[in-house]
Image (cartoon, helix red, strand yellow):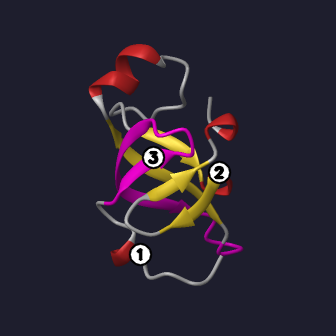
């Protein structure tokens, strides 16, 4: 994946390849020692919160989606749903 400034990802909607909307990107988590992107921090939709209780969340209920699940960034942040659910 090409380098993309965070400001171009922030507030984009996260959608799975199957069309399921997960929520909006709030932030990223990064391994500061290596610079590796670890997770997308996502404000979940009510549907995702109600139907997928096993998704990893932080103490505020925001989703932690592995950055490795991101397959493309355009109008949306596209993720591979199988890497998340």
Q: Nearer the viewer, residue 4 or 58?
A: 4
Determine whether 41 is above or below 27 in the image: above
Mark closer to the chain start, 2 or 1 = 1
**Which corner quadrant of the image does residue 83 belong to?**
top right
**Which corner quadrant of the image does residue 31 belong to?**
bottom right
* Residue at (36, 30) in percent of width and height: 61
Residue 55's spot in the image, x, y percent? 53, 27
* Residue at (39, 39) in percent of width and height: 21
* Residue at (48, 19) in percent of width and height: 52
- Quadrant in which the C terminus is drawn: top right
* Residue at (44, 69) in percent of width and height: 74
Q: Which mark is residue 15?
A: 3
Report how far apart the C-alphas of labels 3 and 2 lie in the structure: 11 Å
For disc 3, the neighbor class at 10 Å (few under 14, some 14 to 19, many from 20) is some
Q: Which residue is mark 2?
A: 69
- Quadrant in which the N terminus is drawn: bottom right
Q: Which mark is residue 6?
A: 1
Residue 17's spot in the image, x, y percent? 57, 45
Mark closer to the chain start, 1 or 3 = 1
Report how far apart the C-alphas of labels 2 and 1 lie in the structure: 17 Å
Q: Nearer the viewer, mark 1 or mark 3?
A: 3
Determine whether 24 is above or below 59 in the image: below
């Amino acid at each position: 994946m090409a380098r993309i400034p965070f400001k171009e990802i922030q507030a984009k909607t996260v959608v799975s390849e199957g069309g399921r909307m997960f929520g909006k990107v709030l932030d990223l988590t990064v391994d500061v020692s290596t610079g590796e992107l670890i997770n997308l921090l996502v404000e979940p939709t009510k549907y995702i919160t109600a139907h997928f209780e096993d998704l990893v969340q932080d103490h505020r209920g925001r989703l932690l989606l592995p950055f490795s699940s991101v397959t493309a960034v355009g109008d949306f942040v596209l993720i591979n749903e199988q890497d998340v659910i």
